[in-house]
Amino acid sequence: MNATIWTAFSIPCRCPISRSWNSTPNRGTWPRTSPTASRSGRCCAIWSTPGRRANYGSRGRLMSNENDHSWLKQGSTSAADVAKNYDDWASTYNDDLVDWDYRSPAAAARLLQAMVSSDATILDAGCGTGLTGSALKAADFTGPIDGTDISQASLDEAGTHGVYRNLRQADMQKLPLDFADDVYDGLICIGVLTYVPDSGGVLREFARMVRPGGAVVISQRSDLFQERAFAKTIKGLTEAGIYAEATITEPQPYLPGNPDFGTEIEVLYVAMIVA
């Protein structure tokens, strides 16, 4: 079996994304142990070992108090519950995330910036209230950006920012998604796959919607990255020829200002090139 070379780097690193996979035999070996992760911002080997267990947490339990967001850490993956929670939260979501020092939209936009041209056509899958779309514009993306989300109230809020060409409601647990093949140069999905158990199916769908040679940037919580053997999923998709290259970052701060997350739960990003 051909081996896969994997690398990772800290988001503050300004070096180009490492092209960490191709189909050439004997390029390297899948790490069997976890090397010490550097927090200096320098490039390093992947830290994660597939299959380790951690506490499960995901989006979605209905709450009677709309100001209580404890369901963020542990809750239901029911699509109906997710839509209800985020519909209820849409009007204050952006302010709350700023208070919690949410950094993922800007971090992911920097990753995508290194992979596609500034005029790329992009899908923001799970766009929510538009934080990631706004981060893409702030990163000087000038091409059209479409957005999709399960929460209609969040889409309504996203539409007020003047960022998106088109917005539509979609449930990522119902595949295939209603998008044509090969229509986007890039796709970004931030803070969403936490709530979709079939990550492999969704990532295959993303590859269908993005042109060959295009880029997909996603995020996953550090606890669920291990709980769901996410690195193994990415490795399998590259070996199957769905993605030509994949790079996984070190864990980064996720919601450091939220007491339920703090430094306990971080986030990793995966940057992939469609085969």
Image: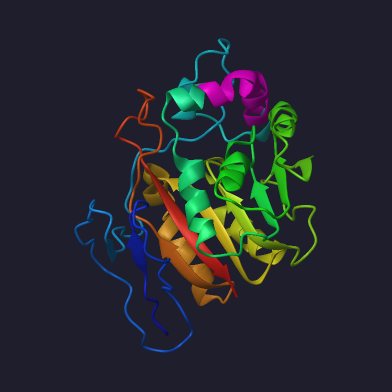
In this view, the residue farthest toward the top is 65
Picture quadrant of residue 79: top right
Image: magenta residue range: 81-95
Image quarter (top left, top right, bottom left or bottom right) of the C terminus:
bottom right
Q: Position of residue 91 (x, y in %)?
A: 64, 19
Q: Is residue 102 left or right of residue 175?
A: left
Q: Which residue is drawn at 49% across and 44% down?
A: 106
- Say if the magenta span includes residue 93: yes
Q: In this view, does 271 lie to the left or right of 155?
A: left
Vertical side of 123 occupied by 58: above or below: above
Q: Which residue is drawn at 49% across and 61% down?
A: 271
Prevailing SS of the magenta stretch: helix
Total numbered labels: 0
Q: Position of residue 59 (x, y in %)?
A: 53, 32
Q: Which residue is drawn at 67% across and 46% down?
A: 172
Q: Which of 140 and 226 is in front in this view?
A: 140
- Say if the magenta span includes residue 38: no
Image quarter (top left, top right, bottom left or bottom right) of the N terminus:
bottom left
In this view, the residue farthest toward the left is 36
Display colour scheme: rainbow
Vertical side of 66 occupied by 16: above or below: below
Q: Nearer the viewer, residue 240 or 102?
A: 102
Q: Position of residue 127 (x, y in %)?
A: 64, 40
Q: Residue at x 57, y 60 (%)?
A: 216
Vertical side of 184 occupied by 102: above or below: above
Q: Is residue 246 left or right of residue 262?
A: right
Q: Which of 129 and 28 is in front in this view?
A: 129
Q: Position of residue 136 (x, y in %)?
A: 59, 47
